[in-house]
Image (spheres, rainbow, N blue to C red):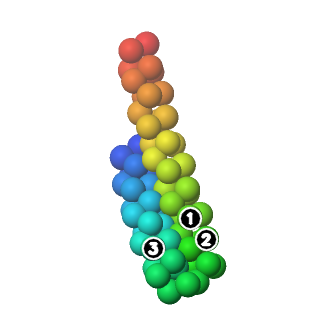
């Protein structure tokens, strides 16, 4: 998967996680809120992978 795809999927997971957290709080469902928290963290990690791939590619392109 390319860096752009990683970043896009990461943003989508973050957004979905935020919605799940809010819904879990609103409906008093801690398990849904926790699921949203985990999904948000997954999204942040995916974005970090995408940014790392970009940085590695820049280093390789300069070599």
Across and down, in percent, residue 8 comes to 37, 54
The reply to whether discs 1 and 3 touch (Cβ–Cβ < 8 Å) is no
Across and down, in percent, residue 30 comes to 61, 78
Say the numbered circle drawn on residue 37. 1
- Residue at the spot x=55%, y=57% of the render? 42
Secondary structure found at label 3 = helix
The reply to whether discs 1 and 2 touch (Cβ–Cβ < 8 Å) is yes
Location of mark 3 (residue): 22
Distance of label 2 from label 3 (alpha carbons): 10 Å
Crowding at dot 2, Cα within 10 Å, few <14 / some 14-19 / many 20+, comes out as some
Q: Nearer the viewer, residue 39 or 7?
A: 39
- Residue at the spot x=40%, y=64% of the render? 15
Distance of label 1 from label 2 (alpha carbons): 5 Å
Distance of label 1 from label 3 (alpha carbons): 10 Å
Q: Earlier in the sequence, mark 2 or mark 3?
A: 3
> Where, quadrant-wise, is the C terminus in this rendering?
top left
Going by the image, does 16 lie left or right of 30? left
Q: Earlier in the sequence, mark 1 or mark 3?
A: 3
Across and down, in percent, residue 58 comes to 39, 24
Label 1 vs label 3, nearer the camera: 3
Q: Nearer the viewer, residue 58 or 38?
A: 38
Going by the image, does 46 lie left or right of 12? right
Q: Is residue 22 visible?
A: yes
Crowding at dot 1, Cα within 10 Å, few <14 / some 14-19 / many 20+, comes out as many
Secondary structure found at label 1 = helix
Crowding at dot 3, Cα within 10 Å, few <14 / some 14-19 / many 20+, comes out as some
Q: Is residue 20 visible?
A: no
Across and down, in percent, residue 3 comes to 41, 43
Q: Nearer the viewer, residue 15 or 60?
A: 15
Say the numbered circle drawn on residue 34. 2
Q: Is residue 52 above or below residue 35?
A: above
- Residue at the spot x=45%, y=42% of the render? 50
């Amino acid at each position: 998967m390319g860096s752009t795809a990683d970043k896009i999927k990461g943003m989508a997971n973050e957004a979905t996680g935020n919605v799940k957290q809010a819904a879990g709080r609103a409906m008093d469902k801690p398990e849904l809120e926790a699921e949203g928290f985990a999904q948000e963290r997954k999204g942040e990690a995916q974005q970090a992978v995408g940014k790392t791939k970009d940085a590695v590619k820049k280093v390789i392109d300069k070599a």
